Image (spheres, helix red, strand yellow):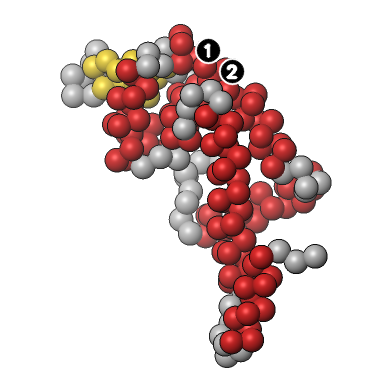
Amino acid sequence: MADHVELVLKQWHDQRPDLDVSPMAVIGRLSRLHRLIDTELRRTFAAHGLDSASFDVLATLRRSDPPHRLTPAELMRASMITSGAVTQRLDRLEARGLVARAPSDSDGRVVHVTLTADGYTLIERVLPDHMETEHRVLAGLPPERRQALADTLRDLLESLGDTTGSP
């Protein structure tokens, strides 16, 4: 059995045998996987009234040390959402009572975003479902292949400069 990318590779090989299209074997599969996985994750988040970016903000706050508080800039660096989405996302989450924003006691120019009790309760409810979805998505790979894939993807991310500077 072959996946869709295998067909694309064969077609390019037939049409342009002079080109090395081997990167498509990885990039094409990563792109297709992203779409398929994103669909599954969105379904899980939607069941809890969230989207991916909202989940990411709540999860980022939850995994930070108590009192689960970060600045918007820290949220952006620690999460998987863009700077443009942070303010919009925070506005929506604050309107729902899931986060609260307050000026810093020590510097009035700094705002802290804190996970509220309702936000904490929601992320605690969503996280097990999210992990179940991720386990289901990866069920086709035995644990040693999952680890090998995770290691390979980390190496690729690091080679492209996606590092935190800490282990």
Is residue 25 at all visible to an observer of this figure?
A: yes
- Which numbered tag is attached to residue 121? 1
Binning the other alpha carbons within 10 Å of mark 2 as few (below 14), some (14 to 19) or many (20 upward) gives: few
Q: CA distance from mark 1 to mark 2?
A: 6 Å
Secondary structure of residue under mark 1: helix
Write down the quadrant of residue 20 in the picture: bottom right
Q: Residue beneath label 2, please?
A: 125
Residue 51 x/y as whole percent: 47, 32
Amino acid bearing label 1 = Thr
Amino acid bearing label 2 = Arg
- Residues at marks 1 and 2 touching, judged by CB atoms closer than 8 Å: yes
Residue 62 x/y as whole percent: 50, 21
Residue sticking out furthest to the top: 117
* Residue plotted at (53% across, 23% down): 48
Residue 53 x/y as whole percent: 43, 35
In this rendered view, identify the residue nearer to me: 65 or 113: 113
* Residue plotted at (37% across, 36% down): 76
In this rendered view, identify the residue nearer to me: 86 or 92: 92
Secondary structure of residue under mark 2: helix
* Residue plotted at (59% across, 87% down): 15
In this rendered view, identify the residue nearer to me: 31 or 2: 2
Is residue 67 at all visible to an observer of this figure?
A: no
Residue sticking out furthest to the bottom: 18
In this rendered view, identify the residue nearer to me: 145 or 131: 131
Q: In the displayed structure, would residue 159 be above or below residue 76?
A: below
Q: In the displayed structure, would residue 122 be above or below residue 78?
A: above
Residue 54 x/y as whole percent: 43, 29
- Which numbered tag is attached to residue 71? none
